[in-house]
């Protein structure tokens, strides 16, 4: 497992998924990343910093956003 910093680009409250931009790259966007259900919708604002947990670094579908911070 690996924890990475990212920036929230969009959030879909219907299925609790998001698009993020990894902090290490200005061009890498990951779409349809699962968001932990304990994170309030009000906190999922475009531009916020998020922590993304990768269970498998080679498969973005195996990632989940676990925290929002400033």
Image (tube, rainbow, N blue to C red):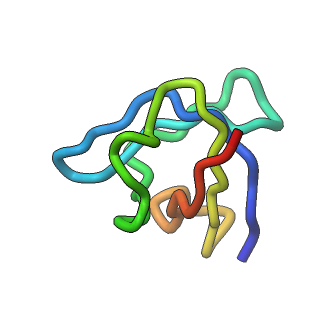
Instruction: Tell whether 37 sits left or right of 9.
Output: left
Residue farthest left in this picture: 14
Quadrant assignment, res 51? bottom right
- Foreground pick, 14 / 19: 14
Q: Position of residue 62 (x, y in %)?
A: 50, 68
User: For residue 60, what is the image quadrant?
Assistant: bottom right
| Percent of width and height locating residue 45 | 46, 30
Kindly identify the residue that appears in the image at 69 percent across and 22 percent down: 27
| Location of residue 24 in the rendering, given as x and y in whole percent from the top left corner | 82, 37
Q: Is residue 61 left or right of residue 13?
A: right
- Residue 2, by quadrant, is bottom right
Looking at the picture, how far across and down is residue 4, in whole percent?
A: 75, 55
Residue drawn where x is 63% and y is 66% of the image:
54
The residue lying at 36 percent from left, 36 percent from top is 11
Of the 4 image quadrants, the one containing the N terminus is bottom right
- Relative vertical location of residue 2 with respect to residue 42 in this rendering, above or below: below
Whether 52 is drawn above or below 38: the answer is above
Q: Quadrant of the C terminus?
A: top right
Q: Residue furthest right?
A: 24
Q: Is 56 left, or right, of 16 in this rendering?
A: right
Q: Residue at x 53, y 63 (%)?
A: 63
Count of marks overlaid on the render = 0
Q: Nearer the viewer, residue 31 or 48?
A: 48
The foreground one among 13 and 43 is 43
């Amino acid at each position: 497992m690996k924890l990475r910093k990212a920036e929230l680009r969009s959030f879909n409250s219907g299925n609790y998924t998001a698009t993020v931009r990894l902090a290490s790259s200005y061009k890498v966007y990951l779409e349809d990343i699962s968001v932990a259900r304990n994170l309030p919708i009000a906190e999922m604002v475009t531009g916020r910093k998020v922590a993304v947990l990768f269970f498998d670094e080679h498969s973005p579908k195996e990632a989940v956003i676990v925290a929002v911070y400033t």
